[in-house]
Every structure is written in C-alpha cells, then in structure tokens.
Amino acid sequence: MTRFMISTALTCLLALPAAAATVAAGDELAETQQYNFWLLDAIKTTDPQKNTDVEGSDILRQLFEGLMNEDQKGAMVPGVATEYTESDDGLTYTFKLRPEAKWSNGEPVTAQNFVDGWQRAVDPATASEYAWFMELMNITNASEIVAGNAAPDTLGVKAVDDHTLEVTLTKPTPYFVKMVSHPTTFPVLKSVIDEKGDAWTQPGNLVGNGAYVLTGHNLGVDITMEKNPEYWDAANVVLDKLTGITVNDQNIALTRYEAGELDRFQIPAGQYPRLKEQYPDQAISLPYSCSYTYLINVSDKGREELKDVNIRRALALGLDRDIIVNQVLQGGQKPAYNWTHWAMEGFEMPDIAMASMSQADRTAEAKQLLEAAGYTPDTPLNLTLNYNTSEDHKKIAVVAQQMWKPLGVNLTLNNMEWKVHTDRMQNQDFELARYAWCADYNEASTFTDYFRSTGKNEGKFNNADYDKLLDEAVTSENPNDQYKAAEAILAAEQPLIPIYHYAKVDMIKPYVKGLPLENVMQSWYAKDMYITKH
C-alpha cells in the first residue's frame, strides 16, 4: 500500500510551490474576474469548528487557511505552515508558520490562533459535531476533553512562540499531516468571537485569514466573498469575487448555467450522456471520494424491526444498484456494496460476497429473509426514508420504493431541507436516511472511522471488534488488512445500505481555469483560479 510518509528529518516545504493562480501561457484574462458556482443547499454555518458539510467546507477554504492546503492533484502543500518536522517516535509535529500571514483585519496570524481553534473544536461548550475528527487525529487528551473529563487547555497543542506550533499525539498517525488541511483545524481569532458571540460569522463581523472575505450571506439564496487584500499571497490571487448561488432544483440550475448565470454546477441524474454530446468541452465525469448510502438507525431510538440484521440485509439485497447507476444516474458512478470509495489512495477493495451475486439471486434472498420475518406484499413492513431536497435524491428514493414494494416493504418518502435533515440525523430522529460521506482526507480511514462507536455515526452502530480493528490500523504495516476486515463487519452487520460511489459529474464553463480536476478530493481553492476572456 502507498502510504503518506515523511522523513523524521526536517521536511522542508519551502521548496514546494505554495499553490496560487498561475496563468497558463496563451491564456488572456477576462476583464471581470468573478466566479459563480452552484450550491444545492443553504450553508448552515461559516464557523470552521461547527461546519459538517462539503459545501460548507468549500466556502471555508476561501475564508480561512489552515496549516496545509491541497494542490491540483491532492498533494499537501504549504498553507500557513511553511515547513514541519516529525519526531523520531512519530508523536510530535512542529510546524513553522509564515510570519507574513495576516487576518483580514490586519492582525498577524499566530500559533496561538491555531491553539484557540483546536481547543475550541474539542471543547464540549462549542458543541462541534466534528469534535470526533480531532480525536481521530490522535491528539493528546482530545478524547478526554471531548468526554468532559479534561479541560480544553490540556489538548496536546501549544504555541512555542508566535510562529511555532507544536502538536503531540498519543500514537504515530502516518496520515496526520493530510488531516491539517481540514476546516475543523483552521485557526480562529478568539478576540472577535469573544466580542461578537454567535454573530461573529456574519458578513462584516467574520475575520478570516483566507484569500477572501465574507461580504454577503442571504441564507438559502446566495453567499458572496471578495478578495482579501490582507491575505499573505494576495498579489497572486486573480479572482476578485466569488458567489455561491443556492438552487435546489438542478434542472433550474441547468437553465441558469446555460443562461450564463452559473459557471459550474452538478449535472442532474440521467443527463450526462446528452450534455456530454452537446457540450463535450464542458461536461465532465471524474472520480470523487464520496459514497452514497441509506443509513439505518440502529440506536435505541430506532425501529425495533431494523434491529434485525436479516431485515437490514434484505433491504440491502433488494436494491438493484446497476439500474440506479446505469439508468437513473448515468454519470460514471459505480455500484457500491462497501463503504470506502474505491479511489482512495492506496485502498484495496474488499471482497464483498453480495457484490458477486446476480441481482436475481440477491432479490430472491431478500424476499426469503423478509418472508421469514413475517413480511410480504400483503403484510408489508412500513418504513420511512428521510432525504434532503434534491431531484436526484428523489429519483433514487422512488426507485428504491418500487424495488422494495414487491418484496414486502412499503417505503414512505419524507423530503426536508438539509439543515432539518441533518439535525434529525444528529438526534437519531429517523428510520432510514439518505446520506453521503465525502472524504476528509485521502486515506481509507476517513471512511471506516465514521462507523466507530465514537465516530460521527448518526445511526449509532456499535461494534467493539470493529473499533479494535481501526485502532490497530493506525500503526499497521499494511492497514488494508484491518480495513478489509472492518468492511467485512459492515457487510455482515449492515448498519448502512451502500448504493453507489460518486463521480464528480459537472458542467464547467471553458473559461474557468484552475479547478483541481485531478484531485479525487475535489478540494478547490479560488485563489488558484482565474477566468479567461470569453
């Protein structure tokens, strides 16, 4: 397996390019440097320690900057940190911060700002849904603080001086440096939070250290950002203005794209073949590190029927993923019978028995399992599926409804806005829930760790053997052995119904340059982009 490893000697990042917009030879810049991109849902928060969403992360990468960034291919490059060292035992990382980094109000960015952000993430008073991410980083005392058994200031992170940050871990974590580009690890200016309270994230109040500042946020309508003159590399930032436009209906988004109101948006299900033929230089389908699933609530709040593993297995068997991928989506997605996306760096796909069965055999077994539990089309099992507003999610849900009905399952579809949907999931207020998990860093553990008993894990799956495997994987010579065994437990216990592995299926205007089309994470930075004449 290819693992992200660094030398125990000084790893000097100064020799690497701190990615910024590089205008290609022959490209002529447009007079107006503005990028208008599509958002499916309202941005719940612009607080880096409280965000949980992919679209929210896209916004936060523009407003803040962490220790590291990702380049066009997903490799780690300097952000606020210019270099770092790793101790011989792999337990201490020391980051050197660039002295020219500033906040948007002109104050210098210091190591203490990172300490404040990281302590804030684990502090129970913050109520961060991503506190568990800091635990997965194996930072000393993170778990104790999250559990309320230690004070936030005991976290294993300290400012040695204004430009030196030291982090101590409880165990060597080979992918640790990959994790410090995640928004949860971004710094904050504590004085602003103390002064403004919950309103600190509003336009005019938010002080960030990213390449852009927040200038407007009409919840569920649009969010605007403009170039930050205080950003340390502002001289190399080309785009002047970014506008994220929320459009729940992707067909309307397509109309707005064709009218020139959007520069990028996600192609509606089933329309990629037509649009690729019509716009061959604009329609794309690329590997994208997200997995689409129906999550099952196996907590104490869940339906008693869904605590029966045979019923959960029947639901998984009864979905014809080939129809969903090839007839509904038609965008290069792959059927999923496991959780971890196939394109994660170094990951070896596990052998899941269900994947090698014919759909006829899967359907027959599903019917047998449901009949054995007492459910038939005449005496059906009634279940409700929650899903957030999207025509694509609705199409897949309707197909699932039709596939399960002949097996003895009546599925009620319950549509709601994203914030309501995620709040209900967080409180285990669901039976089945449409969900997708996108990688937080390019290593398989970002998927497997979700189902830890202490993970995000909204369905509250709990398996001690599973947790033990993931603990072992961190220091394993070949963690794929543990990942495969963990995936086998998920396949046996079925706390989820994997449906497909994503592809990034988008329309992008040909004049938009600098998007990271070779990065499976699809993490984009507007500071690296520009608009050519068109």
Image (cartoon, rainbow, N blue to C red):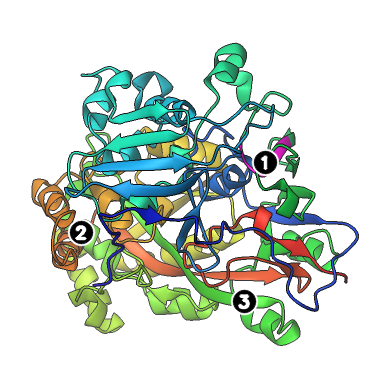
The spot of residue 281 in percent (x, y) is 72, 82
**In this figure, which residue is indicated by the disc labeled 2?**
490
Upstream in the sequence, badge 3 or badge 2? 3
Numbered disc in front, either 1 or 3: 1
Disc number placed over residue 231 in the picture, else none: 1
Asked where in the image residue 344 lies, by quadrant, the reply is: bottom left
Which of the two labelled residues, at mark 1 and mark 2, occupies the earlier sequence position? 1
- Left of 103 or right of it: where is 499? left
Q: Is mark 3 on a helix, strand or loop?
A: strand
Q: What stretch is highlighted in magenta?
A: 209-214
Q: Which residue is drawn at 24% across and 50% down?
A: 173
The mark that comes first in sequence, 1 or 3, is 1
Instruction: Answer whether residue 213 is magenta in the image.
Output: yes
Q: Which picture quadrant has residue 152?
A: top left
| Disc sitting over residue 284 in the figure | 3
Spatial separation of the CA atoms under disc 1 and disc 2: 45 Å
Q: Looking at the picture, tell me which residue is in the foreground, 93 or 12.
A: 12
Q: Which amino acid does label 2 sit on?
A: Leu
Q: Give amino acid for label 3.
A: Ile
| Residue mark closest to the camera, 3 vs 2 | 3
